[in-house]
Image (cartoon, rainbow, N blue to C red):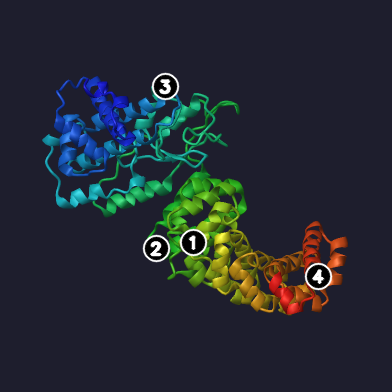
């Protein structure tokens, strides 16, 4: 009562302190609302404030757990669902940091309780014998991705909907049965909940609100296998899966049915077998499975969606560092390349832990085929602008420059297209210059076959817009090459050569003098009249620069060197 009557407006306290008090008040009211009529003391108030501030002291957690009677799976699950219900009834308002802090507090209490009660049934904490030290560590180290965020238990039957989200069973089932129509902020639920969600006529993923392309759920075999392996290696009994759900009566109805929950298809069973082989300890099984996935992902978008949704990406990523088996490594990186063709998979790959660093390592040390496909993968991923910075920061540019310099023709093409995309991002231009890209590009301009001229000029046009790039390109005697391409190159080459000259001549007038001596003026006049739209613009910019320079020279009567110092 006292907390609820605090006159915040009359007190000079920070918003943060006010929020902390309100958090404690909410927690106390919730506990009392459940029939817990104990008299809460100052110690509980102080303990809650301490935990909201990030304290993880086990003694404080024990006191709070006991006083709030959060000591069994039922208690903790009810509290979690109640907090989520509070979120759903907030009128759509953003719950902000307060809700996040309450959820984190509940998670910390659950982690503490679980340390002393691995089975976490409905027997209270204080009546259970303590665990051995080894068991303590096992429970503390359960990977977060293996737990259901609501119950905080190991998932037993994870499934995936077509949007790519993974779900687990009982907690979300209760959540939806209570009439909630939105998904709590989590990645993991179970089969029955999604089944009910779809049968009620919903057509969007409850988490992302993305409309589902189909209503068939795909078991997450990869995650299930990883959980089983983790349990075995840590001496923990794997969670028991519920009995397989019967197919929905709507699964066999007309095509207008709102959902489809049929038994696993031959395709799904095949994918399950392949993913299990990827985790095998036998190299030949891994190699064979990775090769089959490579072919499946190459065939069509349907396969790319199903493979990614089934958890193939992290398993393939784990094989990227397999330098003892180059063929398996080639299959893995090429499978990732083929999966990346589907637009939505690009984000999944980038966000998979170890994916980009792994691809970069293959690019550095793999076989030539693996390096080529790693470069092609980086090109595919870099199509999305926000990925350009991530890839550049992972150290991809130096090995791409090396492949452009020493690779096969196909490797040079893959490296060139990847470098072009990456250098569009300003932060990567300096990295590319410092990695020695400009001399490599200049050498490609003089190759007899001229098969990389287009790519080389396009990248030079980008790099010459960077301060470091101007210095290095200018020092590489690029002006003569650019004038030659403006005179006799293809329309695209003329554009890019002119773009390089625009940057150099705007930066240092000595390049204007050099270009004029090489006879560029007539070529620019022709290009301004008959070139492509971009070519006309670049030619006009250069002609304007020449005109200004010559006008200043006439007006001042100074020598050329003096005029150069004025521009």
Which label's residue is closer to the chain start, 4 or 1? 1
Cα distance between the residues tagged 4 and 2: 81 Å
Image depth: mark 3 or mark 1 in front:
1
Q: Name which residue lies at 26% across and 32% down.
A: 76
Q: Is residue 180 above or below residue 526?
A: above
Crowd band around label 2 with a 10 angstrom C-alpha radius: few (<14), some (14–19), many (20+): few
> In the rendered image, which residue does mark 4 sit on?
555
C-alpha gap between disc 2 and disc 1: 34 Å
Residue 297: horizontal and vertical position, in percent?
A: 57, 53
Please tell me which of labels 3 and 1 falls first in the chain.
3
Counting other residues with Cα less than 10 Å from the Cα at mark 4, is it few (<14), some (14-19), or many (20 or more)?
A: few
Position of 136 relative to 128 (above/below): below
Circle 1 sits in a helix, a strand or a loop, which is it? helix
Q: Nearer the viewer, mark 4 or mark 2?
A: 4
Indicate which disc, 4 or 2, sits on the residue closer to the N terminus: 2
Q: Residue furthest front?
A: 556
């Amino acid at each position: 009562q006292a907390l609820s009557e605090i006159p915040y407006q009359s007190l000079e306290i920070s918003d943060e302190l006010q929020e902390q008090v309100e958090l404690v008040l909410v927690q106390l009211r919730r506990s009392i609302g459940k029939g817990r009529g104990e008299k809460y003391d100052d110690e509980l108030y102080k303990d809650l404030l301490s935990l909201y501030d990030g304290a993880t002291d086990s003694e404080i957690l024990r006191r709070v757990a006991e006083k709030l009677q959060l000591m069994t799976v039922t208690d903790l699950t009810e509290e979690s669902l109640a907090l989520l219900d509070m979120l759903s009834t907030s009128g759509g308002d953003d719950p902000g940091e307060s809700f996040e802090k309450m959820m984190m507090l509940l998670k910390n209490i659950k982690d503490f309780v679980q340390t002393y009660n691995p089975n976490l049934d409905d027997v209270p904490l204080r009546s259970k014998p303590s665990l051995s030290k080894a068991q303590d560590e096992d429970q503390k180290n359960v990977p977060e991705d293996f737990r259901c965020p609501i119950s905080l238990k190991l998932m037993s039957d994870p499934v995936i909907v077509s949007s790519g989200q993974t779900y687990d069973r009982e907690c979300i089932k209760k959540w939806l049965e209570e009439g909630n129509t939105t998904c709590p902020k989590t990645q993991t639920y179970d089969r029955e909940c999604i089944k009910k969600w779809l049968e009620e006529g919903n057509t969007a993923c409850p988490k992302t609100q993305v409309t589902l392309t189909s209503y068939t759920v795909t078991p997450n075999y990869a995650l299930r296998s990883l959980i089983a392996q983790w349990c075995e290696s840590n001496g923990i009994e794997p969670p028991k899966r519920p009995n397989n759900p019967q197919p929905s009566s709507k699964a066999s109805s007309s095509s207008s049915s709102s959902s489809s929950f049929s038994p696993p298809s031959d395709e799904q069973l095949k994918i399950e077998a392949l993913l299990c082989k990827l985790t095998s300890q036998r190299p030949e099984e891994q190699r064979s499975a990775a090769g089959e996935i490579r072919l499946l992902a190459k065939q069509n978008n349907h396969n790319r969606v199903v493979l990614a949704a089934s958890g193939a990406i992290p398993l393939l990523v784990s094989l990227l560092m397999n330098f003892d088996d180059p063929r398996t490594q080639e299959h893995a990186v090429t499978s990732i390349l083929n999966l990346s063709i589907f637009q939505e998979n690009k984000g999944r790959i980038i966000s998979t832990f170890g994916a980009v660093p792994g691809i970069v390592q293959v690019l550095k040390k793999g076989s030539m085929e693996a390096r080529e496909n790693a470069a092609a993968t980086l090109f595919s991923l870099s199509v999305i602008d926000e990925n350009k910075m991530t890839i550049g920061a992972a150290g991809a540019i130096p090995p791409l420059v090396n492949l452009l310099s020493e690779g096969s023709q196909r490797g040079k093409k893959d490296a060139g297209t990847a470098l072009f995309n990456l250098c569009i991002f300003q932060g990567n231009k300096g990295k590319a210059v410092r990695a020695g890209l400009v001399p490599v590009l200049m050498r490609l301009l003089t190759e007899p076959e001229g098969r990389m001229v287009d790519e080389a000029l396009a990248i030079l046009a980008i790099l010459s817009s960077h301060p470091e790039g101007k210095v290095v390109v200018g020092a590489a005697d690029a002006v003569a090459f650019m004038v030659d391409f403006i005179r006799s190159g293809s329309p695209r080459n003329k554009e890019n050569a002119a773009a390089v000259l625009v940057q150099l001549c705007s930066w240092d007038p000595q390049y204007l003098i050099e270009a004029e001596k090489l006879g560029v003026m007539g070529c620019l006049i022709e290009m301004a009249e008959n070139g492509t739209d971009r070519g006309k613009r670049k030619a006009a910019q250069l002609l304007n620069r020449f005109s200004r320079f010559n006008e200043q020279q006439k007006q001042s009567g100074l020598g050329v060197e003096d005029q150069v110092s004025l521009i």
